[in-house]
Image: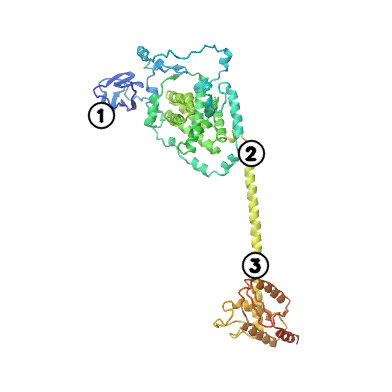
Amino acid sequence: MITPAFDLSQDPDYLILSIRVPYTRTSEFDLYIDGADFKFFAKPYFLRLCLPGRLVEDGREKATFDIDKGIFTVRVPKETAGEHFEGLQMLTSLLAPKGSRSAKPLAEDVSTDGCSQTMGDDEEEDEEEFDWQVEQEVYKESSEEELRALQKYGFGNQRSGVFARLQEELGDVIDNGNPDGTTAAERRQARLEAEASAFSPDHYLADLFEDDEIKGLLKFTPWWTKLSPSTEQEGEAAVSFTDNEKEQLRKFTNRSYLLDKTSRYQVWLSLVDILLAYSYEVRSTEGEHSVESPWTIRKLSGTLCWLETYSSLQEVLVSFGRRVLCYPLYRHFAMVSVAVRDTAKILQTGKACVLRCLLDIHRVFRENDPAYILNDLYITDYCIWIQRVKSKKVTALAETLQKASLRKEDLELELEELEEAATMVVEEEGQGASKNALISCSDSSCTSNEESDESEESEAVGQGCTESSEREGGGGTSKHNPLQPHPTSTASPIPQEPASTLLSVERKANAFPAASEGSSQLIQELGEHFAEELRVSPDSGYKAERDSSQLSSAASKTEVTPGRCSSGTLLELSPRRNPLLIVQTQEEDDELMMTLSS
């Protein structure tokens, strides 16, 4: 028989069942309704459900069949009008148990209210034939010490010996090299040592100071924060499952688990540990799983990676925080805090949201070759178990997680000392950079001040020369003054730069304070002579620099140095200020000296 795809919904008076049964005859439907027991048969499909409430068959029931879609819809009245049936989305828990045919290594309670019947003789007829050629081994009775030494792990600590036959896959699934031979305390000590050796201060500080990408991840909104409040009781959100998720729920074998008080407490704590790792993975990939997703979920969960068993919620948070700062790509304490808030939100939303997260983890592990073993050890049992727990317990766990606090010093990785030292280094580097900037700024300001001083001195000298000329020449510069070339003359050797060229001549003329009016006229005649013979040499870069220095020294001594050239006086132009080199003939120098001496 084939178990068909089905879905359930309700209103205050009716329970609505939608069953997909394509390629069946409309005349061959059989329904059986007895309290909480519902059966449906349409060859080759058979469905039996144990409902959370009782139904009544009083003639108000109604059934329809959509031939095009192959969907059979039946509306059955509730025995108590207005009653709310809880957990209609938990499809696995609604399927009736299959009795002894679903034997597993776990201890199971196969009895359920309203569905305690077994298949009896039909099961024996359907049993597979026994293989008489199976290999046989001599039975060896295990001693009490060997049984005691066999360590427990898995869901509820009820599995053992699993990795004894999976040595090749052991290293790809868990970090513990000998899970069957190490106690829980030894596994924890080995985990703490591995985390301490894996912690990288450089990686942590890099993510701390260069956190632009991490800030973007912190702003991401995961899917569980978008769930709208449900109209159902107990405030659970309206979680909708995909067709693939519903199919996976139907494939699970429905069973109950016999757990003592300590085991139940450890199961709840391990659930929080797994959900924390899942929340971090969803946020770090922004909701898009990658090939690294199985590794990330497994590595961040001490339950999955080290088969850890916790005794308090604070131990779970400390273990998760340490592993986030040691292994994944983004090692920032803010990622730990936001994962805790996300997990609290998942639990607060209700067990349907928790189930959907577990189904997502189950799918991720199922598609990864070695990680599927963790489904058999933990995730499959969690998917079945969570459907039967009471919603108020999930809500109470969410409230406890919201009140829990995790500080950096709780992780025992010396994070605060490391951050303080790094901050001091950054501040010192910043101070050194500012000092260098101030030094370079002062150097540039000194240079600019020197240049400004030079320009001010030259301007002052120019103004002094002008005033002296006005006093000695009896007014402003004449338009026929030889010190000022005519801009309209085409024969002028320096048509565009007369001011700087003749400024040196004026400075020379005014450098003699004892000169009489006759000497001023002589100097003007010399200026006319110089203006006629001025030429600009195109290749005078080096000479202009050298001769300019000679000119400035000569001006400071108020002496006129005789030139080396007797004729063909040259004036070479330099890019520096006042670059004129005035070369005079020997005869003119003698006449000038005689005039000055007289």
Give the image location of residue 358, x and y in percent. 45, 29
Q: Quadrant of the C terminus?
A: bottom right
- Inspect the image, locate mark 3, and give the three-letter code of the amino acid beneath it: Glu
Residue that numbered label 1 is attached to: 67
Q: Residues within 10 Å of mark 1 (few under 14, many from 20)?
A: some
User: Which label was assigned to residue 417?
Assistant: 2
In the current view of this chain or complex, which residue is farthest to the front? Answer: 133
Q: Helix, strand or loop at disc 2?
A: helix
Mark 1 vs mark 2, CA separation in Å? 71 Å
Give whichever of discs 2 and 3 has the lower sequence position: 2
- Inspect the image, locate mark 2, and give the three-letter code of the amino acid beneath it: Glu
In the current view of this chain or complex, which residue is farthest to the left? Answer: 27
- Inspect the image, locate mark 1, and give the three-letter code of the amino acid beneath it: Ile
Residue at x 66% of width, y 68% of height? 453
- The quarter of the picture where residue 355 lies is top left
Residue at x 49% of width, y 23% of height? 155
Circles 1 and 3: CB atoms closer than 8 Å: no
Q: Nearer the viewer, mark 1 or mark 3?
A: 1
